[in-house]
Amino acid sequence: MIAQNQNRYSILYGKETIEFELEFYERQRFRIDVHPNNRVVVYAPIGKNIDEIKERVKKKAPWIIKQKLYFEQYQPSLPNKSYISGETHLYLGRQYRLKVSESNYEEVRLVGKYILVHIKSKQNTLKVKALVEEWYKVHARKIFQQYLLDCYNRSDKFRFELPKYQIRKMNKRWGSYTKRGDILLNLELIKTPLYCIEYVIMHELCHVEVRNHNVQFYKLLTALMPDWKKRKEKLHTFLL
Ligand SMILES: [Zn+2]
């Protein structure tokens, strides 16, 4: 699973509110991660109380703020889109301009640097959104299927049948492997580069073999995709 949801807390540092997610782990030292999507995750040794933890976060606040500013410089996608001409939309990690034209038919096409949408009324932005999403879905189905097969066939280490997959809209994960044995892939993945898509698919395929994120899991993943860390880092520059 590539997930993100934990306990949320916040501290005040000057005028700045720093929100963070808290996780406990079996280490002696604190760890603070600032992710490109502005998530701050604090890993605290088991047994530390919340006041101690907040104190620690406060001490590290200047560093956290610096990290956040750095990531804000290249935030590639905005969470809310209006679906009007001129807006930027992502496809396979590249930015395209949306161009909405009125015509008597409905169609979405990629032409050069543009995602062209033909629609009866461009005021109907909900309909534009639906058309664009359907277009994403069509391409996601094709590309995810191809990469799933490709990743599966690349390994003679897999001793299972090719699992089924479903495309979902998920808020907090790029992909997951369900208890029922299906791979779920986030539709949003289609907005990230192919090598990130490939990474998520390989990651989930490895879960069929090894459920948990343990040493064995990472051994397998590294054997099949030695550069997975780089791909993962790139994936994190895309908002979820
Ligand atoms: Zn996982």
Image: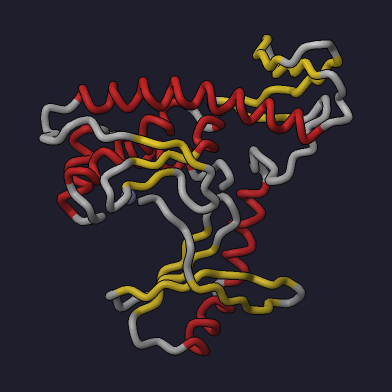
- On the picture, is 138 further left or further right than 162? right
Residue sitting nearer the eye, 192 or 147 = 147
Location of residue 92 with respect to 67 vertically, above or below? above
State how the image is colored.
Answer: secondary structure
- What is the tally of numbered marks visible in this picture? 0
Name the side, left or right, on which 29 lies relative to 136.
left
Q: Is residue 46 above or below residue 201?
A: below
Q: Residue at x 58, y 51 (%)?
A: 37
Give how far across and how far down residue 154 sits, in percent: 21, 23
Please state the horizontal and vertical placement of residue 119, each as a whole percent of the image. Answer: 80, 19
Q: Position of residue 38 (x, y in %)?
A: 60, 56
Of residues 80 and 71, the one drawn nearer to the viewer in this rendering: 80
In the image, 33 versus 83, the foreground residue is 83
At x 61%, y 49%, the residue is 71
Q: Is residue 222 above or below residue 86?
A: below
Residue 4 vs 164, above or below: the answer is: below
Q: Residue at x 68, y 10 (%)?
A: 111
- Residue in view at x 27 percent, y 27 percent: 151
Give the side of residue 133 with respect to residue 186, left or right: right
> Where in the figure is residue 185, as x and y percent of width and height?
43, 39
Residue 73's quadrant in the figure? Answer: top right
Q: Quadrant of residue 158?
A: top left
